[in-house]
Image: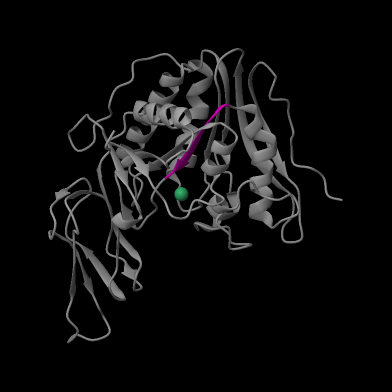
Amino acid sequence: MSEAPHLTFDLDTPGVSTGNLVVPKGADCEVLSLPVFSCNRGEGPSLLITGGNHGNELEGPIVARRLVEWLPEAQKCGRIIIVPEINPLAVQAWTRNTPIDGKNLNRVFPGRSDGSVSERIADAISRVLLPMVDTIFDLHSFGPTWNYPPAVITHPIADVDLMTKTLRISEAFKLPVTLLWEHDDTAGMFDTWAHSQGKIFICTEFGGGTISAEALTIYEAGVRNGLIALGLVEGIAEYPTFRQQRSGQTLETNPSDQLKSPAPGIFEPRCSVLDEVKQGDLIGILHPMDSLSADSIDVRAPTTSIVCGILSGVYVQANEEVASLARPLAI
Ligand SMILES: [Zn+2]
């Protein structure tokens, strides 16, 4: 029988401490030791911050490392646990999924102790860390092939009270977009499991494309605002500047807002994120590349909406998502 997942240190130690979350070995992989930071300032909220759930979204691990630098000075109460990379195998391979088992870590929660390596990581987080906190910030981004605004997203939650609290804290990040996202593939997500345990789960989507210093400043400000909202650090929450504006909007999107490629080819964007579009406006053009006599195909807005995300110059297969639309949240 293999050992159980565990921490190499006591999270109840007052003040700052560091150690590892040990994910036991299995048939496919040796033991993993994930670096863990803890700052325990006694009574107050308890928060887990995770990055590197998907290995090609490195904004999260970078912001998590920055937090480790300044939190010891700034944190006034409560408990904050940070795991900058929950999936180091995917981060090192710069892939969305875990290379060893090909699985999406964010679809295998709560995991399995006798499963493949992604399932063992999820099991370790679910069993060892999740019970110790009441709130989770899981730091994602849209990855290198998307244009996406700095956002906090949440999926619809059946528990009305938890939904209200989650939206309130999401908006408190003061990022340009807070998005209520009705997703058609939520089984096994970290947030779905955390919600089932009554936890507040905040999922950031820190933009897309390459990672600029300017963008990281916005993301870090968003997390700081979230920490202020929870009462873990002191300060005044302010909107970071994004495209010369300091404001935020709350939007909603559902599966029918995903625009799909009509054929294989290169997608050329013809609008920018947060553009307001009317029915029939041009979103982008799909260029089939196997024949120059094949017509390029317009992708148009089916309804009045706001462009939330758009693919940037990528070769796609037929029926792949090329743009994501949204509308102001109807309260
Ligand atoms: Zn992600």
Residue 328, percent from left and from top: 24, 39
Between 106 and 246, the residue placed more toward the observer is 106
Determine the residue positioned at 18% across, 32% down.
Answer: 245
Between 210 and 184, the residue placed more toward the observer is 184
When the figure is inspected, residue 300 is found, relative to residue 84, above or below; the finding is below
Q: Is residue 270 magenta?
A: no
Say whether residue 30 is left or right of residue 277.
Answer: right
When the figure is inspected, residue 249 is found, relative to residue 4, above or below; the finding is above
Say whether residue 249 is left or right of residue 186.
Answer: left
Residue 40, percent from left and from top: 61, 19
Residue 260, percent from left and from top: 30, 65
Determine the residue positioned at 74% across, 33% down.
Answer: 8
Determine the residue positioned at 34% across, 73% down.
Answer: 318
When the figure is inspected, residue 131 is found, relative to residue 293, above or below; the finding is above
When the figure is inspected, residue 267 is found, relative to residue 174, above or below; the finding is below
Q: Which residues are magenta?
A: 134-140
